[in-house]
Amino acid sequence: MISFEEAYKIVLQQAKPIGSERVPMMDSLNRILAEDIFSDMDMPPFDKSAVDGFACRSEDFGKEQEFVFLEMIETIPAGKVAEKQVDSGQCSKIMTGAMIPSGADCVVMVEETSVGPEGKIRLPAGKKARNICYTGEDIRKGDKVLPNGTLIRPQHIPVLASVGAINPLVSERVRIGIFSTGDELVEPGSKPAQSQIRNSNAWQILAQVTEAGCIPDYHGIAGDSKESLELKLKTAMDRNHGVILTGGVSMGDFDFVPEVFTKCGIDILFKSIAIQPGRPTVFGQKENKFVFGLPGNPVSSFVLFELLVRPFLQKIMGYDQPSSYIRLPMASDYLRKRSTRKSLIPVKIINSEIVPLEYHGSAHINAFTKADGIVALEIGETRLNKGDLLYVRQI
């Protein structure tokens, strides 16, 4: 049995990047960028008006009188180039985003103006705000706008669009074969007979794999025999980058996973972690393919996926960012009896404090429907005190 920290290190050391591909911009959403993106132009590409108003010369406002009257010489809509230069005593009506005409160096908001005598525009005298977005003030041509390894979210799409990166290079999506083991399992659409339970683990993993940006490939349920397990494993490995299975990894008479892994030529790198829940977790590799054998209890498989499998998948897709942790105080004391393994407990965040949830052990997946995160008690640690500052792994 190895520590969780050692298991985590082993897993990430084996996380080798997969290939990349160019995809249409909208298909890149939730994918990992596999190249740096540079701007092919200044942004803004020209001096443009930040407001609807009148493009003027600031020197015309250095008067002692209360108002200034200017001749309006043209209207400039967005997308059109001004036809006339603004000279002293003149102004051009201009729309937000339109190019500033030659001669003008400020824009007076339309709300501050009115029509005066002889159709001239009346504007208050005095120093004026520029109200101009200047060429390249946001981005200069050649600037890196998105780095390699970015997880593309909706806010990144307009950046790609603005620099013409309509077919970005992204990491391939990892294809993962998924199945559960156990004669006691039936699929969710079936009514369990006596001594049977519904297969929730595989569907949980399918959801987590999909959320992680990977492609799930479901292979159903393997029975409690070496032959059934071996057939499922070989088929899933042939069709995918890797496999995640649940159950059959402990020390029971029908827990054949480690033995079948070895028979299939998989190099087992560890098969027991000093963590609670999740101790009987197996990780192995065969050539360039990976296999995770997660425990059959739903909390164990959920937590180990979040803390161990998800970082592995992110890294092989080129996303090597730390998981999201926040540091908050405990709202109350928390005690546990055994401390031989690192313990992970579900918590809720209320009024910026950590509140441990009622939790009955590794089969109590319902506790996680209310959880905002997970906190850890290290080996040998039996107590958390009210006010202790802890890191919460958000989920």
Image (cartoon, rainbow, N blue to C red):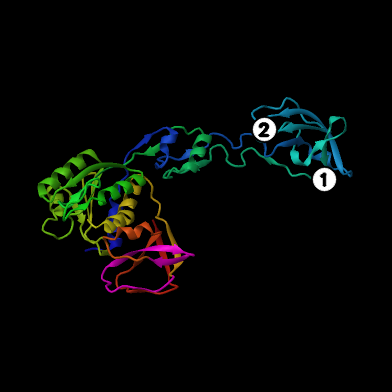
- Position of 13 with respect to 167 (left or right) is left
Quadrant in the picture for residue 28: top left
Tell me the amino acid under the disc marked 1. Gly
Quadrant in the picture for residue 134: top right
Say which residue label 1 marks. 126
Q: Which mark is residue 98?
A: 2
Q: Residue at x 39, y 38 (%)?
A: 170
Tell me the amino acid under the disc marked 2. Ala
Instruction: Sort mark 2 into few (<14), some (14-19) or many (20+) by Cα contacts within 10 Å.
Output: many
Observer-nearest residue: 52 or 41? 52
The Cα atoms of the two marked residues, 1 and 2, are separated by 24 Å
Q: Which mark is residue 292?
A: none
Q: Residue at x 44, y 63 (%)?
A: 349
Task: Report the span colored magenta.
Answer: 331-356
Residue 126 appears in the figure? yes
Instruction: Say above or below: 3 vs 101.
Output: below
Which quadrant would the C terminus be assigned to in this image?
bottom left
Instruction: Say above or below: 365 vs 343.
Output: above
Q: Secondary structure at mark 2?
A: loop
Q: Residue at x 77, y 42 (%)?
A: 112
